Image (cartoon, rainbow, N blue to C red):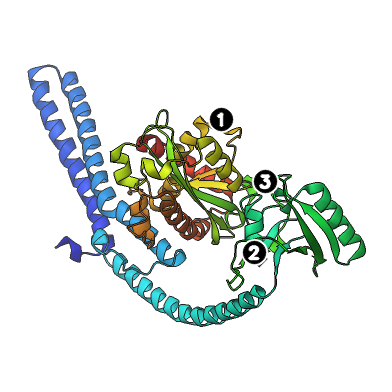
Amino acid sequence: MITRLSLRLRIFLFFVLLGLGGSVAVGGALWLGYARALDTTPANGFVFAAILSALALLALTAGIWLLFDENVAKPIETLAAEMRVRAHADVSREVDLSSARYLGDLAGAAHAVSEKLILGTMTTAQKVALETERLAQEKERLTALLTEIPVAMILVNPRGQIVLYDGQAAEVLTQLHVPRLNAPLSDFFEAKGLDAAVKQLHKTGREVSFVAEGIDGAQSYSARLKPMEGGGYMMVIDGAQTHMAPEAERPLVYDFDLLTLDAPEAVEDTPLAKLCYTVFDTETTGLLPHKDEVVQIGAVRVLNGRIVPGEVMDQLVDPGIPIPPSSTKVHQVSDAMVRGQPDIAEAGRRFHRFAKDSVIVAHNAPFDMAFLRRHRARMGVDWDHPILDTVLLSAVLFGAGQTHTLDALCERLGVEIPARLRHTALGDAQATAQVLVKMLPMLQARGIHTFGDVIEQTRKHGRLLADLN
């Protein structure tokens, strides 16, 4: 019966209940106070009536607030979050009308808007799909053309950061460091010789040949720098020794937005979309960071609001102790798999290099970071990266009262984790990265634009992580 009433009438009934209940409570208290006054003194009766009526009003107010919160406030918060998901995270599932059944026509209206939005999105998606297919075909032709050129190519912006590298260049870079877009080229090649060649390039405006010395001091390459219009340059490595078959395609990894990259701002003032993120997860021998050990590290990179294809880390780690069968049952990592793999000191250094100059992101970050920080002395590194936690981002967007597990968050945002990848370090890192990419525009739509804004909001929900751990 009540579900047929309008939202305004239902809210009015809450106030009617409060008024009637308050009147009954005060009347009952006065009657009991009067009865007490007949037995004792009038003053005692009035004091008793005042205390009793105050307690009754407080209890009544608390009870009606609980009803209002459960049937009106929470459903409105949930409905608003669901509409944000559909508007900014490209999720097209239907609005859950059952949770908003006491909100009158509000849920129905939200559902209608959502349906209209889905239809418009589908039309736009069809147009985008056609254009994407055309661009993919062009990229395939470009990749096929590059396959015939026996050199490795790296495109560098005016700030000396990598904008593009092909598959052959990726093999060269991998021998020196983890290949990464947005990374300084000096992370891979000795800076003195590289800087001298760049200065000569800028001075003459013509191609410069030089010997690029690897930062490991053990490798050198015959290289050429070619100037580009608008600044920056292309580095061509001749005769690079790689393991790629001659006929194999050389996939390109690139982000041309990096060509016009502005000077870096203080991280707290940097817009969320312009930050570089390293999203990671660990699998461990157990759940106690002070005594258990890491057996696997998985990580992916997010740049300009997009997951960078190919830039992943999937590293098994020898924990130095037996892996309990109960843990292997969860993550499928066995003692035989980690035998001969790097220990946490070496694996931690590799991950530290992979995450250089980025914001580290994890789901329940204090848990994973505790394992790494415990061994920081052995690694010889400082874990001073800015950190974001998707548990707290979920609380900011969907309310602290919701469930914030990775599975719940993926379901809410339409992210699918293949069963074979769940509870693997790389699989969970990829899922967390997809969740992050969907939440970034939602945060901006809520007026949370910079990293500093996010930190200010997530601090309000810090207790969630304490309870989770």
The image shows residue 367 at horizontal and vertical percentages of 43, 37
Q: Amino acid at mark 1?
A: Arg
Q: Nearer the viewer, residue 379 or 448?
A: 379
Task: Name the N-terminal-most of marks 1 and 3.
Answer: 3
Task: Name the N-terminal-most of marks 2 and 1.
Answer: 2
Callout 3: few (<14), some (14-19), or many (20+) C-alpha neighbours within 10 Å?
few
Disc on res. 168: 2
- In this picture, residue 198 sits left or right of residue 12: right
Q: In the picture shown, does residue 152 fall above or below 377?
A: below
Real-space Cα separation, disc 1 to disc 3, in angstroms: 30 Å
Q: Amino acid at mark 2?
A: Gln
Q: Residue at x 56, y 30 (%)?
A: 378
Real-space Cα separation, disc 3 to disc 2, in angstroms: 35 Å
> Please, what secondary structure does the residue beneath circle 1 have?
helix
Q: Amino acid at mark 3?
A: Ala
The image shows residue 213 at horizontal and vertical percentages of 77, 50
Mark 2–mark 1 CB contact (< 8 Å): no
Real-space Cα separation, disc 2 to disc 1, in angstroms: 34 Å
Mark 1–mark 3 CB contact (< 8 Å): no
Q: Nearer the viewer, residue 20 or 229?
A: 229
* Label 1 sits on residue: 378
Q: Residue at x 39, y 78 (%)?
A: 119
Q: Nearer the viewer, residue 76 or 192?
A: 192
Q: Quadrant of residue 179?
A: bottom right
